[in-house]
Image (cartoon, rainbow, N blue to C red):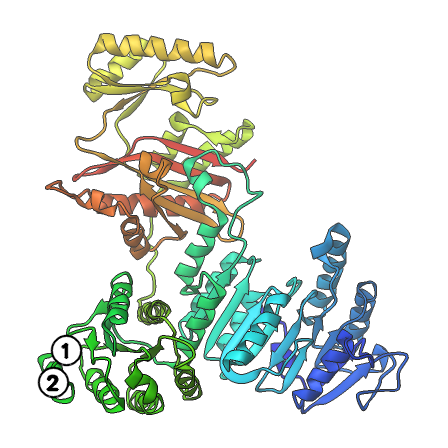
Amino acid sequence: MIESKYDLHALFNPKTVAVIGASSVPGKVGHTILHNMIQAEYQGTLIPVNPKSDTILGLPVTKSINDLPVGLDLAVLTIPKQFVVQALEQLAEIKTRSAIIITAGFKEVGHEGYKLEQQVAEICTKHHIALIGPNCLGMINIGGKVNASFASGKPLPGSIAFFSQSGALCSSILDWALGENVGFSKFISLGNKAVLSESHMLEYLGNDPETKVVLGYIENITAGEEFIRTARKVTARKPVIMVKSGTTSAGAKAASSHTGAIAGSDNAYSAAFNQAGVIRARSISTLFNLAQAFSLQPLPKGPNLAIVTNAGGPGIMAADACERSALNMASLSPTTVSKLKEVLPPYASLYNPIDIAGDANAQAFGSSLDIVLRDENIHAVLVMLTPTSTAADDLENITQAIIDVAKTTDKPVFPCFMGKKRISDGQKMLQEAGLPCYIFPEPAIESLEAMYKYHEWQNKAEPVIPEIQRDRDRAAAVISGTIARGADEIVEFQAQEILQAYNLPVPRTGLARTSDDAVTFAEDIGYPVVLKIASPQISHKSDVGGVKVGLKDADAVRDAFMDITSRAQRMRPEAMITGCLVQEMAPKGAKEIIIGFKRDDQFGPLIMFGLGGIYVEVLKDIAFRLAPLSREDAHNIIREIRSYMLLKGVRGERSVDFAAIENILLIMSRLSLDFPEIYEAEFNPVLVNKDKAVVADVRISLHT
C-alpha cells in the first residue's frame, strides 16, 4: 500500500485550477493549456496567472500566486525553471493540494537540474502537494472535463486510462487514438516523477470507476517492491498492461557469476510484471490491441477457441497462431456440427476452423457464429472475413449480422476482417458497435491469449510462502566475519557453513589441511572422490587447476593434493592456501542445474534457474522469479525452461527429483531475503538425479 498523504482527487477532479504562466500568445504552452481547459468545457473556476495581462481568452487574470484562493485544488506551472521553486513555496503557503509542472530542464539535463528537482520534491513532500512532473505534457480527465495538458486534439471518452513517462509518446498516442476512434478515461504524462510515480497512478486508477483497463509506458520504476504490491492489488480487479523500454542493464555492477551476467534489469522487470499480474506488451501496437480487446470484450472463461472463416488459408493461419499460444483449437460437439450442416452448403468444412466458404452471405455468417457460440465447449470465437466478391458486395449485412450475434453472448467475439480498402466500411461499423477489429489473425490470437491468461490470474489462489527451517545466526557469523576481513566474496570451503545452516543437501565433504587428512576423509567418504582447492582468495578453482575428480585410491588422493596445492601456490602466490576440500562424487546419472540470485536495484533478489553446462553458458536457457518464491513459483520456474523435458526424462530416462530442486529454490529465496548484504549467490552445479539433488559448488558475493 502506497502513502495516501497526497490528494489525487483534487488533482484529477479540481474545483479550482490556476495556470501559472498563462499566456495570451497562441502557440505558447501557457496559452495552449488554458485553451484546452476551456475546450474541455471545464466546469470549475479557471484562473490564469500572469503579472502582465488583464484578461486571457476572456478570463480575468490574477497577477500573483499570493492572490490565489487558499486551498487551491490544482496549479499548472508553465513558467521558466528558475522560478519554479519560488512559485511552489508560494503555492504551499496557500495550501495548494496538487500541481503539474510542465516546465523542462530538471534532472533530465544534468546535475544542476537534478538539484533543482530535489528542491521541488522536498517542498511538495513536506506540504503534501500531489505533483505530476516536472518535464511532462500534463494530465487529462475526460469524464471530469479537465484537460490540463498542452496536447493537441480533444480525446474521446472511453474506459482506458493511460500513463506515460514520455510526453512525446503521449502526443503521438493521442493523435493515433483520435484517428482510430479510441477513447480514454484518464491520460497522464508522468514526466520525471519527482513525487507521484507509476505506483500512485495504479493505486488511483485501480479505484477509478471510469477506468476499465490501465495502460502504462515506463522507462524505469522508482520503487520496485511498492510497485509489485500495488500492481498485484489492482490486477485482482482490472487488467494492467504495460510497455517497458530501456531493456538493457548498462552501467550495472560487473558480475562475477553466471547469474550476475545473465540476470539483467529486463529480466527483473519481466519477473516483476509476471508476479504482479501485469500484462507486458512488447510494442505500442500490441499495447493498444490488448487495450481495445480488454475494454470491449468479456474475458474468455477457458482456452477453447473456434474459428469461423469464409476462406481456408486464413483459417489455417489462425489455427497455426492458436497452436503456438496457450489457447486450444476446440472440438465442436456433435450437436453443433449437426446444426451447422443445416445452415451451410455441403462443400463447407464443419470442423474447426469452420470454413463456411467464399460465397457465404450474411445469413451464413450470422447463423454459423450463433451456433458455434452456443456450444458449451467453446470459450471464444474468431470470426474471419476476406473480401471475396460475395463478402464485399454484402459487407454491410454481414458486419451487422456479426454485431447482432455478438450482442447476445457473454463470450468474446473477435472479428478479423483481412484487407483494407474493400472492407474498411465494415471495420468502421465494428468499431462503432464496440467490437475490436483486426486486420490479421495473429494480433487477435495474441489478444485472446492475454485475456485468457488474465482470467487465470484473477482466479489464482493467494501465493503461499513456505517457512524455511534454518540457523540464521550461524550463517550470519560467516558473512559478518568475511566483511570484517575486508573480503567481498565467500568461496566454497567457507560457504559450506552457510549451506549447512540452511539445511541444504551437500555432498559429504571434509576440509583437508594435509595429504594425510585428505586420505582419511576420502576413506571415510568412500572412493571415488573429488578434491578442490580451498583458499579464500581463489574463487575460480578451474583457473588454477584446482579440481581433480574420480580419485579412486589413497595414492591418487595424495598425488592430487600435492599437485593442486603446489600449482595454486605457483599461480597465485598471494593467496592463502588452506588445503583441499574432499567431496563425494556426483550421484549416479546426475544432471547439472544452476540456481542463483542477483539483487536487482529496484526489485530485490532475482532468482534464476536453468540447466548447467552449455545450457546456461551458450543457450542461456533460464527462467526468473523475484523473491520471495511461493511453492507454485518454485514449481513453475523449473517448467519454464526450454530444456525442461531433459529433466523430466526422454527415451526411457527416469525423471529427476523435482521436489528436491524446488526445495533448494525455496531455500535460496529465503537466503536472499535474510541477508541484504549478499549481492549475488550461485549454486553451480546442483547435481540432481531421480533420488536426490545436492549442491556441489557455491559462490556468494557481498556488497562492497
* Callout 1 amino acid: Leu
Q: Position of residue 623 (x, y in %)?
A: 35, 48
Residue 101: numbered disc: none
483 to the left or right of 394: right
Image height of 128 relative to 669, above or below? below
Inspect this view and state whether residue 253 appears: yes
Depth check, front residue: 150 or 85: 150
Please tell me which residue is depicted at 88% across the width and 86% down the height of the picture: 54
Q: Position of residue 142 (x, y in %)?
A: 58, 84
- Residue 694: image quadrant is top left
Please tell me which residue is depicted at 28% across the width and 82% down the height of the picture: 411
Number of marks drawn: 2
Q: Position of residue 399 (x, y in %)?
A: 34, 88
449 to the left or right of 90: left
Spatial distance from mark 1 to mark 2, Cα to Cα? Answer: 7 Å
Q: Are marks 1 and 2 in contact (CB under 8 Å)?
A: yes
Q: Residue tagged by mark 1?
A: 350
Give the residue furthest to the right.
52
612 to the left or right of 89: left
Crowd band around label 1 with a 10 angstrom C-alpha radius: few (<14), some (14–19), many (20+): many
* Callout 2 amino acid: Lys
Q: Residue tagged by mark 2?
A: 341
Q: Secondary structure at mark 2?
A: helix
